[in-house]
Amino acid sequence: MARLTPIDTAYFKSERAGDFAVIGSAVPRSDARAHVTGRTVFFEDMAPPEMTHVKIHRSTRHHALINRVDVSGALGVPGVLRVITHQDVPNNWYTVLRLIGVGPDDEPVLAEDRVLYRGEPIVAVVAETEDAAREGAARVTVDYTDLPAVFDVEEALADGAPIIKQAGANHFAYEGHHCRRIRFGDVERGFAEADRIIEGHYSSSPIEHAPTEPTGCIVVPQGDGRLRIHTNTQAAFFTLDNTALILGVPPTSLRVVGGTVGGGFGGKVDVIVEPLACIAAMLTGRPAKYVYSRAEEMQVSSPRAAERISIKDGVMDDGRIVARKITLYVDAGAYSRHSPYGTTKAAAHMPGPYTIPNVHVDAYCVYTNRTPSSAMRGFGVTIGDFALESHMDRIARELNMDPLRLRLKNAYRDGDMKAHRKIASGTALVEVIQSAADLVGHDLPPEYRAMSSTERPEG
Amino acid sequence: MALRHGRGYAAVNYPTGMNLGGDPSQALVHATTMGGFVVTLSSVDLGQGLRTVIAQCAAETLGIPIENIIVDTADTDTGPHCMGTFASRGTHRVGNAVIMAAREAREVMLQVAADELEVDAEDLETDGTGFVRLKGSTEKKIHISDVALAAHFRQGRTISGRGIYLKEPSSPVPETGEMDPDSCQAHACTVAEVAVDDETGVIEVLRLFNTYEIGRALNPALATQQVEGGAWMGLSHALFESTEPYYPHSREHGPVDFTEYLMPGPADIPAQTSLFLERPAGNGPFGAKGIGEMTANAPIPAIANAVYDAVGVRLTSMPFTPEKVLRGLDELRAGRAG
């Protein structure tokens, strides 16, 4: 019998009408038995005849010009079939979000004249065996001229910082602005009216998705000239469309087969392995497999971005927050991938689930000489929630106020306008707090107990 | 030196979907000859159970047993477009698309049955066991197998439907950030209880209490799996994980395998007590909101706040390593001494 979290049906009783036959019941997972008996078929269970293997020679430098790449050592390894360089990639520059109109293209599939992070792919080696491919990749030699690197988001934005991006600035430009802005009310007037100002600074390190199954694909050339791509992508058409654009082929020449993934958490949304495996298959006419090793998964697959968040609040002695100013830096690493999108999501999330009349947010998507970061579970929100809710605790301590009452006093309700000017609806912050208080026997006075997300009493 | 206990609180909301330029998902539903119903998608199941919950949405809408539903995922030759499985959007977007497709297919199914039974389609209902029947009658009914056979071999009709969920693109106003970035918001409140060893700096999370408001629990077992797994991930972020332990000062010492990249093992997992609230979303499938991502978030600040409650150290940088706790304690002592 499945373990079930109980549903407290006393809350929102009138809105929970509806009688369902299948919805709301604990139907067993259709894939559970196959998973636990080892019979689920993942892409790596494919074993097409004549399959080749792709391994990558990666940058050992954080930021450098590439003077010369010598692949002769790789070609001398028995079993090595081809070496792929940027010249073999029809449209080498891309960005995954161009499909929805976000640009510019800022990342090469394979490095051309420079590298922007340690681990950046420079050359792909295609071989009969995984060992030969690995050995071939290891024997590629690259002559570099090191360039000044920048590793810190605030240093990257400072005057005189080495500019690492071809666009001419170490930040993504949002319609001419340095950052994604939220402007609501008058934050300076809010600070002037506040009884006290409370500030805090919060930060995080990069995080790995740690899926059980590493990122990878197997590409199988078909008799009709098409390529069948078996992949663990989280987004089949995203992969197909971007791969077609990079290869410069009609989308109808590709077919993506997937659907079963051993953990993604956002790490399998980027389109990284499929284009090179397709090129390998096209050059050799044979199936090609490109899968990250665990070390690659941890070192060069997009991590969750490190963030740095500063919060300055104007607070009244009764606990009302009247102004909130947030500066947020997302470390995108060397290339955009999904970070401009995640940064906008971060800005839209502010100031948290609270109704604050004056809000000012500057959310920067910053480029540094680090592994490009990208989507991960809670994209743009997880670190923000850490900062926001740590700050709420700080305010409660400073005011000597119960932490749940502080949150209830400021909680957003239906009909409130959020800082990004959308009217809140379907809110339930008040109720989850009341319910959690009950779970731990945390006492709430009657006026807090009587609060509701569906109505806001006068005053 | 002592083990010191503390309690911390955190409350969060989380957007379902994230929309800068439209992010549609489509579904096709069709009946096979003997009344199997295939839901064709190009959506991906990440192990969270998308196929199962989609089958539930299809069965509920069609009014037939879930055993009759086949869910076909992620083949771009056969499946209609899906933007992908991310942004807590799978259940919401794909579920809505499947409901729309299944409604269209149900309409044809009832018309075919009406012709077979020689009644009006509006007078028919499904009973969930596989029969289409005349409302109020126990006699006048036909099994979906016979409906499908009639459609294929006698009436020459396809029992099929098309569905799409598209939230229109919203471009932020550059000056103000005015935008409509989500479809609905889910909510959570976490209370963490910790023990902090003030000699070693080690934080142990003893218990997590969570209330999650998720719109509607389409499958309470799968929802439970999300919240328990999510809380584990949050705890892991809070106390263990980093690919760059010395960020931003050095890229050295990055882990390359699971012996170096630390995550909680069974002994580190706290007791969890959770509760669901349901406030159905008007635009959600049967009211469901996306909860995949939210569940990892509230535990992180709840743990940080519990550590402050226990030892007075404000942890401002993730992860909360023993070193950071000890440095904080040293600063407190130095402050007292000064």
Image (cartoon, coloured by chain):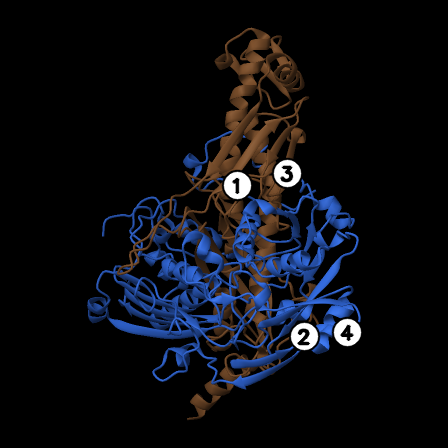
Chain colours: A blue, B brown
Q: Residues within 10 Å of mark 1 (few under 14, many from 20)?
A: many
Q: CA distance from mark 3 to mark 1?
A: 13 Å
SS category of the residue bearing label 2: loop
Q: Residues within 10 Å of mark 3 (few under 14, many from 20)?
A: some
SS category of the residue bearing label 4: loop
| The one of B237 and B110 positioned closer to us in this rendering | B110
Let me know if marks 3 and 1 both belong to one chain: yes
Q: CA distance from mark 4 to mark 3?
A: 43 Å
Amino acid under disc 1:
Val
Q: Which residue is mark 1?
A: B94
Q: CA distance from mark 4 to mark 2?
A: 32 Å
- Check the residue under mark 2 and report the chain it is in: B
Q: CA distance from mark 3 to mark 2?
A: 38 Å
Foreground: disc 1 or disc 4: 4
Amino acid under disc 3:
Asp
Residue at the location (55% across, 47% down)? A251
Q: Which residue is mark 3?
A: B72
| The one of A146 and A251 positioned closer to us in this rendering | A251
Q: Quadrant of the N terminus of chain B?
A: bottom right
**Residue A261 sits above or below residue B240 on the image:** above
Q: Is residue B48 left or right of residue A63?
A: right
Q: Is residue A112 left or right of residue A165?
A: right
Q: CA distance from mark 1 to mark 4?
A: 48 Å
Q: Which label was assigned to residue B260?
A: 2
Tag 4 near tag 2, CB within 8 Å: no
- Check the residue under mark 3 and report the chain it is in: B
Foreground: disc 4 or disc 2: 4
